[in-house]
Image: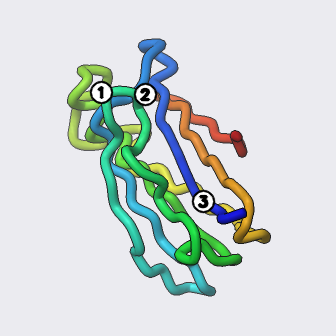
Amino acid sequence: MMGKLTTHVLDTARGKPAHGVKIMLYRVSGNSHKKIAETVTNADGRTDAPMLEGKALTAGSYELVFCAGAYLRSSGQAAGEVLFLDEIPIRFGVPDANAHYHVPLLISPFAYSTYRGS
């Protein structure tokens, strides 16, 4: 089995997928962050392809950074120079590079949550 990392973004305030959210993926080692992928969510709030898969996914620490502030502004849910939520980092570990890791983000202008999905 080949491992993969996927994600999606749901707008819980509007009850629909979050289209156009920029997502960056970093490999984390100590205080070092190395950007290894970047994408934007499609109309279904998902990425068109896994963030990582196969041999590119190795055991270790990763961080997804969701540019929620730009999405919230463009959807009319937030305004102003300073937002309560802007970039949302989610750091997680991959102990088994052969498994599927699905890390979704559920957002609203004043809250977010995540979980390990399937």
Q: CA distance from mark 1 to mark 2?
A: 7 Å
Residue 20 is drawn in which quadrant? top left
Circle 2 packing at 10 Å, graded few (<14), some (14-19), many (20+), is many
Q: Amino acid at mark 1?
A: Ala
Label number found at residue 109: 2
Label number found at residue 78: 1
Circle 3 packing at 10 Å, graded few (<14), some (14-19), many (20+), is many
Report x, y in % for residue 75: 26, 23
Report x, y in % for residue 14: 42, 13
Above/below status of 69 relative to 61: above
Question: Which residue bears the numbered disc 3?
Answer: 4
Report x, y in % for residue 103: 61, 47
User: Which mark sits nearer the N-terminus, 1 or 2?
Assistant: 1
Residue that sits furthest to the right in the current view: 95
The residue positioned 64% from the left and 77% from the top of the image is 58
Q: CA distance from mark 1 to mark 3?
A: 33 Å
**Quadrant containing the N terminus in the rendered view:** bottom right
